[in-house]
Image (cartoon, coloured by chain):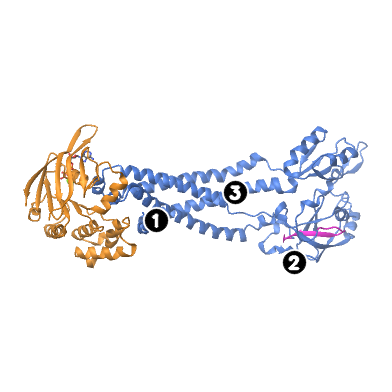
Chain colours: A orange, B blue
Amino acid sequence: MEVESLEIKNITKKYITKSDEVMAVDNVSYKFLSGKFYAIMGHSGSGKSTLISILGTLEVPTSGSCIIGKKDISNLSDEKLSKIRNKNIGFIFQNYALDPNLKSYENVILPMYINEKIKKEDRKNKAIELLKYVNLEARIEHYPRELSGGEQQRVAIARALANDPDIILADEPTGNLDEKNEEIIFDILKKISISGRTVIVVSHNNNILKYADVVLYMQNGKLGVKNEG
Amino acid sequence: MKGNSLKEISLKHLFKKENALFITIITILILIIYVLLTISNLVIDYYYSMNRYNYLARTLIVEKGDKSEKDLDDISNIKHVVANVSNKYYNEFFAPILERDEGQLAIGAIINKKDLKIVKGRSPENLNEIVIPVKFCPYNEFDIEKDKFINGNKLIGSTFTIKSDKSVNYNLDHDDPKYLEMMDKRETVTLTIVGTYDSTANLVEADTAFATIKTIDNLKSPYHGGHGVIDSDGNSIFYNDEYVDRMIRVDSYKNLDYVKNELTKQGFDFWEAMSIDLMEFLTILLVPLVVSIILLIVTFVLIKNFINKKLNNRHTTLGLLKAIGYTNKDIKKLEFTENIIITLFCALVSFIIYFIVYLVVTKNFLAIFNYYSFTVKIPLFLITVLLIFIIIFIKVINNRVTHNILKQNVMQLIKED
Ligand SMILES: Nc1ncnc2c1ncn2[C@@H]1O[C@H](COP(=O)(O)OP(=O)(O)OP(=O)(O)O)[C@@H](O)[C@H]1O
Ligand SMILES: [Mg+2]
């Protein structure tokens, strides 16, 4: 069963700086389906992060439209976009972006604070469940500095799953990790996609090809499909 | 976003080692500002209390000059003049209390009954009756200690014995045998305490009792305040200006100018029994005020740098909050909560230290203020204004810095560390 979770139509993103104009994303259209693992590859500067930002509603495209679920999110207010990010999208970053002052489970709770659907008393249990899901039940009370890079990234994945989003966006999630940890992370991301979510992962690394259902390629802001499996 | 959750997150960020220095410095600065505000407040309070509430501030001394006694008597007809008596009642009569070692009593004349606020008992009516302050300290101002204050109410009905100067000729040389004999033969007078009055309303010294004019006449030597002069024939004669000038009292401070105008119109020379020079007062006030403003500016600069540094060290966290669905408003609120908690914590700690110091100092070292029936007050109004200023400042700085950070590309913010 293939359900469309995210669609972009004729997306263009132009960065205008004092010295020049950069067409970071150039007229890109694509439909992402739930339950699939997408890999986005491409050279540095080809526009991968920019595309992820647009998919994640962090950047507004210069032109084109973006449809999440069945909603066109172009022209929505900061407040509405924030709500979509909170409920429908989970982000994973190369540097994990954990709050160093919060314990693992507290980092996972962070997105739940502003989700009125999760009751206050359920938050911690839910966070612990998610940490178990990424095999970190032994690190629940640890601070980020007490965790290895791979473990930190798994906390970040648990956090991305906090509000049960349909879409997981990961920008080079294994960029700082060794091969063994990379496999662990990709395995988890794969598991997440199999559970029915759309997982979109930007990576430089060919190892991802083993996991990806679809491999997309970016070049000079244009998106191409390399392999649709 | 619910306030509770905000505080929960904020508190996790707060009391960390890197904030300890900031907390310490701000606490000390705010503490010093509290103290300076207390001093400023004290100066202002003292100025206004002295000028407005002390009856001396509405007392004028009118010189006799070439005016007739009738002219002087007619001053009573000026509107708002409530007393018009000889100037000999201006100075209190000082006498050692015979029952008390080093005890001293100053006795003032009641020239206008309304000037005294009776707390317990009644006002003196008969000869040798006195009222004393509720917080009574029958000692010379150079001898004050906190345990010398007595509850005046408990003394009502009891008596003090002093010596009257009535028969002493102060115009004689102090080694004149006649003078020494007079001193020896001074009459003993027993004063009965019939009530207490509120000395704080008038800012009268705590050793001051009040009695009727008749009682004062019975105590004071007619030569008191006089001095010898040489007349045109070369003879030494006694001259006492206290007895020829008049002391008049106005019903309230706000009518003082009116009465002064009338006196000037009628050609009288006069002077105010007590007034503090406004310029002098402003100079005294300026010092603590200017220093506290400078310290406040320093505090503001430190708070600004602290917020700036803290937020700019947290690009990743701020970007992340944005990515996981916090609105700009949420993030501003979150950071504001954090900054305000930390600063108000400093303000609270300062206040606790300040309050303890206040209690210790006022109870133990400021007996002299109590002696002058003056209380050092905690400047709650100024402190409130100060805190409101700080809160507004933090709000503005916090929102500006957060806004500038959140303007940037979120992905880029998260990448930075
Ligand atoms: N905020 C910005 N302002 C101006 N130009 C930008 C901005 N963000 C990205 N760009 C430019 O847009 C282009 C695409 O950048 P992007 O970060 O999307 O590339 P990328 O494929 O993610 O590269 P990398 O693999 O190095 O992360 C680059 O040329 C970059 O310089
Ligand atoms: Mg990138």
Tell me the SS state at disc 3: helix
Do callouts 2 and 1 point to residues on the same chain?
Answer: yes
**Left or right position of A58 against B191:** left
Name the kind of residue labelled 2 in the image. Answer: Lys
- Callout 1 amino acid: Gly
* Chain of residue at mark 1: B
Chain letter of the residue beneath label 2 in the structure image: B
Question: Splitting the image into 4 quarters, where does residue B158 fall?
Answer: bottom right
| Residue B364 to residue B33: above or below | below
The answer to whether B126 appears left or right of A121 in the picture is right
Q: Amino acid at mark 3?
A: Asn
C-alpha gap between disc 1 and disc 3: 37 Å
Residue B129 lies in magenta, yes or no?
yes
Ligand 1 under 8 Å from disc 2 Cβ: no
Q: Residue at x 32, y 62 (%)?
A: A119
Spot occupied by residue A115 in the image (x, y as percentages of width and height): 31, 56
The N terminus of chain B, quarter of image: bottom left
Are the residues flagged by discs 1 and 3 in contact, CB closer than 8 Å? Answer: no
Q: Is the residue indicated by label 1 positioned so its CB lies within 8 Å of ligand 1?
A: no
Calculate the distance from the C-alpha at mark 3 to the C-alpha at mark 2: 33 Å
Tell me which numbered mark, 2 or 1, is placed earlier along the sequence: 1
Alpha carbon of mark 2 to alpha carbon of mark 1: how far?
Answer: 56 Å
Decide: few, some or many residues near mark 2? Use Cα within 10 Å; few <14, some 14-19, many ≥20.
Answer: few
Residue labelled with disc 1: B3
Q: Are marks 3 and 2 in contact (CB under 8 Å)?
A: no
Q: Is there any visible trace of residue B305 in the rendered image?
A: yes
Give me the residue at 77% from left, 54% from top: B116
Residue A41 x, y percent position in the rendering: 11, 47
- Mark 2, residue position: B154
